[in-house]
Image (tube, rainbow, N blue to C red):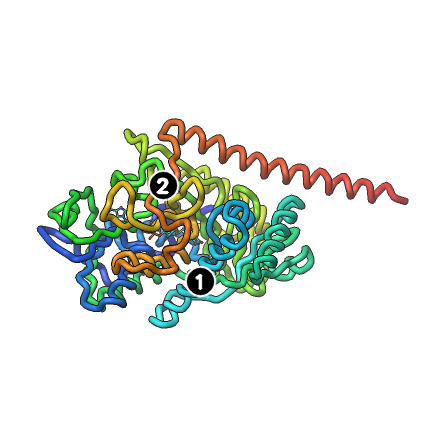
Amino acid sequence: MSVAIERDDLSFWVETPDELPCAPLRGEATAEIAIVGGGLAGLSAAYHLIQERPGLDVVLLEANRVGSGASGRNTGMLGPRVGRSLVDLCRRYGEADARRLYQATIDAVTQVKALIYAEKIACDLEETPQVKAAMTSRQVDALQAERRMLQRLGFAASWYDERQIAGISPVRYRAGLGYPHSGLLNPVRLCRELKRIVVGRGVRVHEQTRVSGFTPGHPLTLALPGGTLAAARVLLATDAYTPQLGLLRGQLIPLQTHVIQTQRLSAEQLGRLNWPGRTPFFEASNIFNYYRLTPDDRIVFGGGRPLYQAAAKDRQSGATDVADPRVWEGQAKVFSRRFPALADVAIVRRWAGTVGMTLDHLPVVGELAEAPGILFAGGWNGHGVALATASGATMADFVMRRRSPRMDFPWVRGRAPRVPPDPLRALGLSAYLTGLGLADRLQMLRESLSRRGARTAEGRVP
Ligand SMILES: Cc1cc2nc3c(=O)[nH]c(=O)nc-3n(C[C@H](O)[C@H](O)[C@H](O)COP(=O)(O)OP(=O)(O)OC[C@H]3O[C@@H](n4cnc5c(N)ncnc54)[C@H](O)[C@@H]3O)c2cc1C
């Protein structure tokens, strides 16, 4: 494998030009509803609001271009799950509630697919299961525990033993757990298509319009580079960028995650891999990798050690959209180990993006405790392709001031647990991530020693 980087700033998905660029907002303006952030969450809110109330006066403001945050930089793996793990959800909330929470994430996947089909959104949706793959016997045990829990709660899941996973996977694993309610898509196409739909229905979308602050009151006033927007209701869909606006500081932590992507594989190169169903995989280690094929046969390979960087002169926000080339280099090494048959394939693109994390790994959806009148949807903890895209329905519930079963979840809340400020935060996170990585390495080492021991013992048997 060689590295011949063509770009390391933008994701592969934004390569195609956006056919509907929207002009910035300048001067003094008003709206009934202002949505800040043009990622999947903001666009979903705009979609649901205008769908439910045609004619509603909605303005969506995006600092850069629609899909330029995490929504345009992810790997497009649409799948269920929320929180640390299902087993952890059961421990914290009890089985009945854990079942309800997990079901809500399956419903989110179903809603995203239904939206794509109903609106005929061309975003390369592929309905395919996702498989979590184990490399060590410890990981196999953890997957078995998750499988038992899924079964006990009545969820479908498929199990692949070592022989079965070898039949579907381009990489050698010990076992795998398949999640049937999943899919793959092109996230930038999804964002741009949602923009086209909402603009067509009357939402005023303004790109390159960064909100720099809020003046409380009725209406709330948003400060913009060349003017203001006064709105009766404000919906913030700025996920990991939110602390930079002075909100959810110390609660929403921006973590950078990195991706590398290969050149297009030829049919012959693809044929060297045993990947018949093109199933996307994510690995069961603490610091994990995940990968998929694009429709035109490139491998998009994400994961590696996430990065937290303190924001310069700001002990509460955390930096966003920064990358560390060492993570990409580490990913390239892992890629070569996973795909030794692709030694002649080049890594041509790499990028990074920011995910909004919370201490308890649950999102925050609702009216912000610290800023009454401002609604927020974010903190997806890296699972936003389904959760953010489906979140607009709950935002519409809030705007319409109606109670709905969607509000009856622990993530419908106005705050998240606090994390200490920098430099303590950066030190703590770094120690935590290093510990997780060491635990992974130790497990792999033990595993290979015990396999070697078993082989030696076998050799001694006459
Ligand atoms: C590398 C990577 C891989 C991932 N892979 C997956 C995956 O496979 N599956 C999955 O489910 N999730 C994945 N995620 C997570 C997922 O992408 C996010 O959870 C989701 O996109 C968040 O959507 P959002 O709309 O809430 O936030 P964002 O997409 O980050 O949107 C926020 C928007 O707000 C704008 N903004 C910020 N500040 C301002 C301001 N002051 N004024 C105006 N606009 C502002 C930003 O420019 C941005 O466009 C991944 C994320 C990354 C980074």
Q: Is residue 168 left or right of residue 186?
A: right
Residue 313 horizontal/vertical position (percent): 28, 29
| Residue 26, visible in the rendered structure | yes
N-term mark: 2 or 1: 1
Kind of residue indicated by mark 1: Asp
Where does label 1 land, which residue?
Answer: 107
Which of the two residues, 131 or 363, is positioned nearer the viewer here? 363
Quadrant (top left, top right, bottom left, bottom right) of the C terminus: top right
Q: Secondary structure at mark 2?
A: loop
Asked if residue 361 lies left or right of residue 39, the reply is right
Would you say 200 lies left or right of 40 here? left
Check the image and report above or below for 225 versus 150. Answer: above
Return the residue at label 2: 252
For the residue pair 106 and 415, the one nearer the viewer reads as: 415
- Asked if residue 299 shows in the view, the reply is no
Nearer to me, 231 or 101: 101
Q: Give the mark count.
A: 2
**Helix, strand, or loop for circle 1?**
helix
**Picture coordinates of residue 397 (x, y %)?**
30, 59
Residue 324 image point, x, y percent: 41, 38
Question: Which residue appears at 30% of the width and 57% of the height?
Answer: 395
Q: Dot 2 surroundings within 10 Å: few (below 14), some, or many (20 or more)?
A: many
Give me the residue at 38% from left, 44% from top. Answer: 356
- What's under tag 2, amino acid-wise? Leu
